[in-house]
Image (spheres, helix red, strand yellow):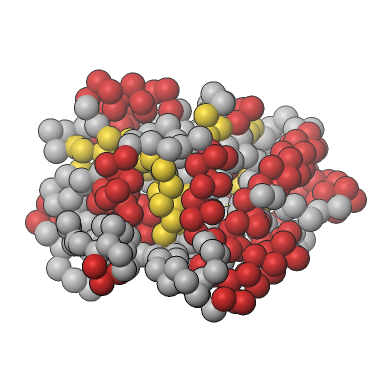
Amino acid sequence: MPGFELFGEEERKEVNDVLQTGILMRYGFDGPRKDIWKSKLLEEAICKKFGCKFAQLVSSGTAALTTALASLGVGAGDEVIMPAFTFVASFEAVISVGAVPVLVDIDDTLTLDPGAVIKAITPKTKCIMAVHMCGSMADLDALLKICKEHDLLLLEDACQSIGSTYKTKYLGTLGHAGTFSFDFVKTITCGEGGVVMTSNEDIFRKSDGYSDHGHDHKGIDRGADLHPFVGYNFRISELHAAVGLAQIRKLDEFLKIQRKNHQELKNILSEVPEISFRKIPDPSGDSCTFLSWFMPTEELTRALVTELMHQNILAGNFYWFDNNWHYIRKWDHLKNGATLNTLNDPQNEALQKIRQTSFSVSDQVMSRCVSTAISLIWTEEQLKEKGKKMAGAIKKILSKHGVSA
Ligand SMILES: Cc1ncc(COP(=O)(O)O)c(C=O)c1O
């Protein structure tokens, strides 16, 4: 997810515009800012590019999820169904609004298994948080149908899938609200930043206020703004938005390179018939930030990871099953309720349930999965060499374990 790989003059120019006025804040200071409004311009660009009516920039993807949940009215006692493979921000946001994280299995799309979602629905379920992991998408037809039938809200976490589409619509714009992260390792970056997207004006107004201390942004100055509700400070700065403005203009180019490199690497790895690839609900919409693939068994995957390490080619290949950030297996702090402040009773009960739940279906998928990050700056030679070395290492392990000739 490498927007930072192609960082240059365009970003510097946008940042310099802001530095020249010295107005680093996105709101107010109308005179001295000399009509430089980078956050507003980036919000407009997001609406135009992704096809949502409203966009609220915030300080991170985590802040975007928190803001979206609050604006959707998700709070104490409400259950939010989310996948067992995601990023820690998913449950952090749910817990921070007082709601209850309900973790369910993923399938070979590496995203929510719709069947597992249906099984997890209770009278307290309010929202399904679909997390479009690793550049690709969840089965949105299935999830939208479930939401409609059960009168649930759909929040799309598209933080890792900026520019992916599902049946021609951009991820993050199909649910009631959607989020992107613009942190340093995302497809386009602000350094730090995030956005809540929606086409519902009420959700947008709430996101706008919630991310800025509840300000209604209608006063003649900030001191005159009213506060229809309590909010927090999740504001983005003009400097960060300036970087994002340069990056969003490059997004199509980034996607083009990613898709080309992804296809070439996939072609090389496809020469090994024993490996299979992640299921993608709409292959033409994959943003291709990662190529995710499966070895036949966990044992073979572990042997391969060791081999890649020995050959010094593990970098850029992620074995999420052992990763402390992304998979339930390693989230002891969540399972043990290790929070600094006291959780509410429904949250404590939910965590106890998570401790007792087997995620063996997800384990079956994740223990065999490797995701290879796609770089924008590989040369043709580097790409071919990487693919050849990876295919060679896979074949070596398979043959060593008697799986192929
Ligand atoms: C799926 C997902 N959601 C949310 C986030 C949080 O984004 P941020 O780092 O901007 O808070 C991330 C960050 O990696 C992510 O991968």
Query: Is 386 in front, or is 145?
Result: 145
Foreground residue, 276 or 209? 209
Q: Is residue 36 left or right of residue 356?
A: right
Residue 247 visible from this viewpoint = yes
Q: Is residue 279 visible?
A: no
Q: Is residue 33 left or right of residue 398?
A: left
Q: Residue 89 location, x and y as percent? A: 38, 57
Classify 243 as above or below 249.
Answer: below
**Taking 404 as reference, is 321 above or below it?**
below
- Relative image position of residue 20 (x, y in whole percent): 62, 77
Q: Is 192 placed above or below 71 here? A: below
Q: Name the residue located 57 percent from the left edge and 40 percent from the top edge.
A: 49
Relative height, residue 239 to residue 258 (above, below):
below
Image quarter of residue 344: bottom left
- Is 46 on the left or on the right of 349, as rendered? right
Where in the figure is residue 147, as x and y percent of width and height?
A: 29, 27
107 sits left or right of 232 in the view: right
Q: Position of residue 51 (x, y in %)?
A: 51, 35
| View extreme (right): residue | 381
Q: Quadrant of the C terminus?
A: top right
Q: Residue furthest left?
A: 345
How many numbered markers are drawn? 0
Residue at (27%, 50%) from the top-left corner?
206
Q: Residue at x 31, y 52 (%)?
A: 207
Q: Pick the residue in front: 297 or 334.
A: 334
Q: Residue at x 51, y 71 (%)?
A: 33
Q: Front-most of 83 and 305?
A: 83
